[in-house]
Amino acid sequence: MPVNPKATSIHGVMTYKDIASLPITPDLAVIATPPDTIPALVDELGARGTRAAVILTAGFAEGETAVGKARAAQMLAAARPHLMRIVGPNCLGIAVPGIGLNATFAPAALLTGNIAFLTQSGAMATTVLDWALPRGIGFSAIVSMGDMSDVDFGDLLDYFGLDDATQAILIYAEGITQARKFM
């Protein structure tokens, strides 16, 4: 029987009913819930001290709809007071093979290497991973940013440019949102 009465075990993995039931504060949250639930989840996680979230869910500004843009604005407004950073929404996620982090829904195995691959496209990320695996090519990180509502290429270039595990940065860009920061 689980120690926490609000927790259950499914195939050896502990699951919790809600954020308040978590025994510790996560450093990184991976959110894949309906889009209208995300601003409240971001606010609750941020208030608890979570520093970053990967939002896998679509339904934000990618369709350029008023509803999607409003959702994105609400999500960012919920994160801002807590200084929480957001990767996504509408993204494949983040993987850092060297530390065993795979916060993606990519089906491929990941090899550790010294290339950081930064992309907006989840499809391009899975294609590159499928190509790299049989060739023995590994990565220091793979980051699929999706809509780039918050974290963008400039942020990640700054980070991986100083990362000791990264010797090269590979970018697949569909667009640059903040040209000055990118440069």
Image (cartoon, rainbow, N blue to C red):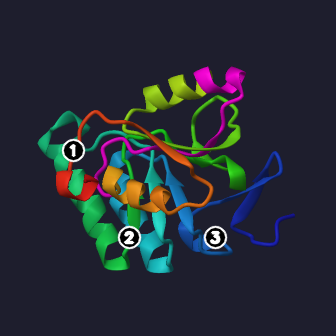
Residue drawn at x 68%, y 74% as measured from the top left: 23
Q: Tell me the kind of residue under disc 2.
A: Asp
Q: List x then y, in percent, for residue 149.
A: 28, 52
Q: List x then y, in percent, for residue 47.
A: 43, 78
Q: Tell me the kind of residue under disc 1.
A: Gly
Q: Which residue is mark 1?
A: 68
Say if 77 sits above or below 105 in the image: below
Q: Earlier in the sequence, mark 3 or mark 2?
A: 3
Asked which quadrant contains residue 17, the reply is: bottom right
Q: Quadrant of the N terminus?
A: bottom right
Say if 164 sits above or below 142 in the image: below
Numbered range of the magenta stretch:
131-150
Q: Which residue is mark 2?
A: 43
Q: How many marks?
A: 3
Q: Nearer the viewer, residue 100 or 72?
A: 100
Question: Is residue 76 part of the magenta span, yes or no?
Answer: no
Answer few, some or many: residues within 10 Å of disc 3's Cα (few below 14, many 20 plus, some between 14 and 19): some
SS at circle 2: helix
Residue drawn at x 82%, y 72% as measured from the top left: 3
Residue drawn at x 64%, y 70% as measured from the top left: 22
Q: List x then y, in percent, for residue 120.
A: 36, 38
Residue 177 seen anywhere in this rendered image of the structure: yes
Question: Is residue 136 part of the magenta span, yes or no?
Answer: yes
Q: List x then y, in percent, for residue 113.
A: 67, 43
